[in-house]
Amino acid sequence: NKKAFIFDLDGVIVDTAKYHYLAWQKIANELNIDFTLEHNELLKGVSRVRSLDIILELGKVEASQEDKDKWLVQKNEDYLSYLVDMNESEILPGVFPVLKFLKEKGQPIALGSASKNARPILEKTGILSYFDAIVDGNDVTNAKPDPEVFLIAAQLLNINPEDAIVFEDSVAGVQAANIGKMTSVGIGSATVLHEAKYIFKDFTEIDTNFIEDLIKK
Ligand code: G6P
Ligand code: MG
């Protein structure tokens, strides 16, 4: 019995959500826009371009395309500066055992991320080889909560969407999985991710029995 196990990247596999936040905060500060951790939830799972628009909307700031392009470059350079020394220690607790278990069981694994920086991150952390398919921000036109990224991932793994399980830390990502008729597993706060079918604080709370049950379903 094969399922498609699809992982979001930022905030699920690696602890990069905090770096995205720091980089956006810098831009928001420069523009005198109040940008809190709560606002940041709106940005998780959302593309770079859309994230900037959300911040500008929060501050009711209108900007030229030229300025926007400048801030997008600045944000990404700042974000990448946090990743220079990245290694496998950035993989979030409990993720490795789950990936290993799925591999042992011969279950197809995919990445489904909005990030255009996904591949270098998987390389730096040494887990690229675990993924049978990678779908990232370079491959999609519709951002989460549109299910496109996960639908393509399931298709590449040759598995029906109904037989796909999606691990997500963002509201938009959980919604995308649900809209795609996939099983959503929220990783993070139960309050924030209440729309998910299952919710865990982090991967250390996921045991092999849970995964076995998902495979059997
Ligand atoms: C993920 C993150 C977002 C980020 C987006 C684009 O979905 O959760 O915070 O904005 O990817 O990432 P990128 O690396 O392309 O800027
Ligand atoms: Mg995420």
Image (cartoon, helix red, strand yellow):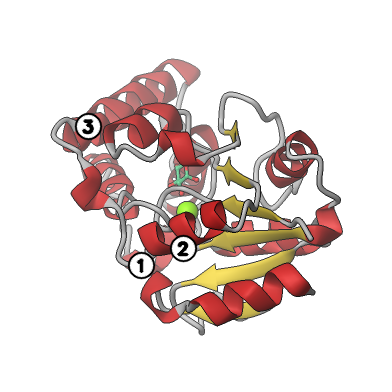
Q: Nearer the viewer, residue 169 or 20?
A: 169
Q: Is residue 54 visible?
A: yes
Mark 2 secondary-structure assignment: helix
Q: Is residue 11 left or right of residue 192?
A: left
**Around disc 3, counting alpha carbons within 10 Å, would you say few (fewer than 14), some (14 to 19), or many (20 or more)?**
some
The picture places residue 121, in percent across and down from the top left corner, at 34, 34
The picture places residue 163, in percent across and down from the top left corner, at 80, 59
**Around disc 2, counting alpha carbons within 10 Å, would you say few (fewer than 14), some (14 to 19), or many (20 or more)?**
some
The residue pinned by badge 2 equals 98
The picture places residue 129, in percent across and down from the top left corner, at 45, 34
Name the residue at 22% across, 32% down.
Answer: 78
- Quarter where residue 112 is shown: top right
Which amino acid lies under the numbered mark 2 shown in the image of this protein?
Val
Mark found first going from the N terminus, 3 or 2:
3
Quadrant where the N terminus lies? Answer: bottom right
203 lies above or below 15: below
Q: Are the residues tagged 1 and 2 within 8 Å (C-beta)?
A: yes
Which amino acid lies under the numbered mark 1 shown in the image of this protein?
Gly
Number of marks? 3
The residue pinned by badge 3 equals 78
17 lies above or below 206: above
Q: Is residue 194 left or right of residue 120?
A: right
**Around disc 1, counting alpha carbons within 10 Å, would you say few (fewer than 14), some (14 to 19), or many (20 or more)?**
some
The residue pinned by badge 1 equals 94
The picture places residue 109, in percent across and down from the top left corner, at 60, 47
How far apart marks 1 and 2 lie (CA) works out to 7 Å
Name the residue at 38% across, 36% down.
Answer: 122
Name the residue at 28% across, 54% down.
Answer: 18
